[in-house]
Amino acid sequence: FDVRERLDRELLVNSYWQSNTMLSLKRASRYFPTIEKIFAEHGIPDDLKYLAVAESNLTNATSSSNAKGVWQFMKLAGKEYGMEINDEVDERYHLEKSTLGAARYLKYLHNRFGNWIDAAAAYNVGPTAYNRIKGKQGGNYFDLNLNSETARYVFRLVAIKEIMSKPNDFGFYLEPNQKYPPLDNYYKVTVSESVPSWSDFAAKHGISYRVLKIYNPWLRENKLTVINNTYQIKIPRI
């Protein structure tokens, strides 16, 4: 009864939180293709793409603990999984690189805990804390007495998957033209020298600064200092 009621709660909360769920459904067509491709390449179950919905509602969010991006990486973890993070660049906001980091992190959690349910729970609460709780209490995820957020987390993933994979069953109806299109019509410009002004760079390529930042949200300032590095900047074909 406990497992059934915990899932029932998440189905109700996520199906009746209509604006939030509708926005996630709209955004999925923009972000899921990239996430699905990277997860498939690295052997991560497709269902775990719903982690990005649970973590950030598919936005470049910032949490109260200063975790950032679609996958909500903390600064140290982001750097550990290959992302550049400084005042001018924060690749936690780079969809491809942060998703690759999430895939590597999930694979590590799976190897450590032995199954994807525990890996998902540990993604939420952290592997050290989760391992300590399991060591004290024993049993599987469903038997553990966890903090409220982590106790709900796996059930929330299941509920999100059910609703987003069968939206009509839950009263959500979207026409194809209501979904947000992928931002995949672009070319890349290699930058190997410092950029004093992204506004000027954008104007040179016939786009606004706003559009440049939409396609490259990991650029955090209006300039870039380049030292022995190169960057690939997306320029939309408008």
Image: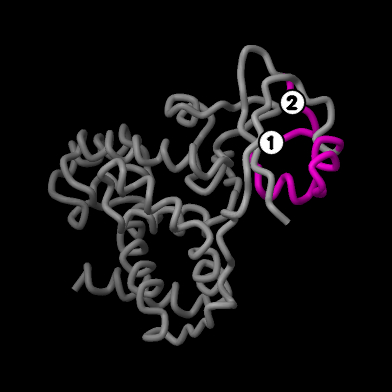
Magenta-span inclusion, residue 165: no
Q: Which residue is mark 1?
A: 219
Q: Nearer the viewer, residue 124 or 235?
A: 235
Q: Which residue is mark 2?
A: 224
Magenta-span inclusion, residue 214: yes
Above-or-below relation of 62 to 23: above
Read off the magenta span.
200-225
Above-or-below relation of 8 to 118: below
Asked if the residue under mark 1 is in contact with the one under mark 2, i.e. CB atoms within 8 Å, the reply is yes
What residue is rendered at 57% in x and 34% in y? 91
| Residue 38 as seen in the image, left or right of residue 220 | left
Q: Earlier in the sequence, mark 2 or mark 1?
A: 1
Residue type of the residue flagged with mark 2: Leu
Q: Position of residue 170 (x, y in %)?
A: 40, 84
Mark 2, residues whose alpha carbon is within 10 Å: few (<14), some, or many (≥20)?
Answer: some
Q: Position of residue 134 (x, y in %)?
A: 20, 41
Q: Position of residue 62 (x, y in %)?
A: 60, 46
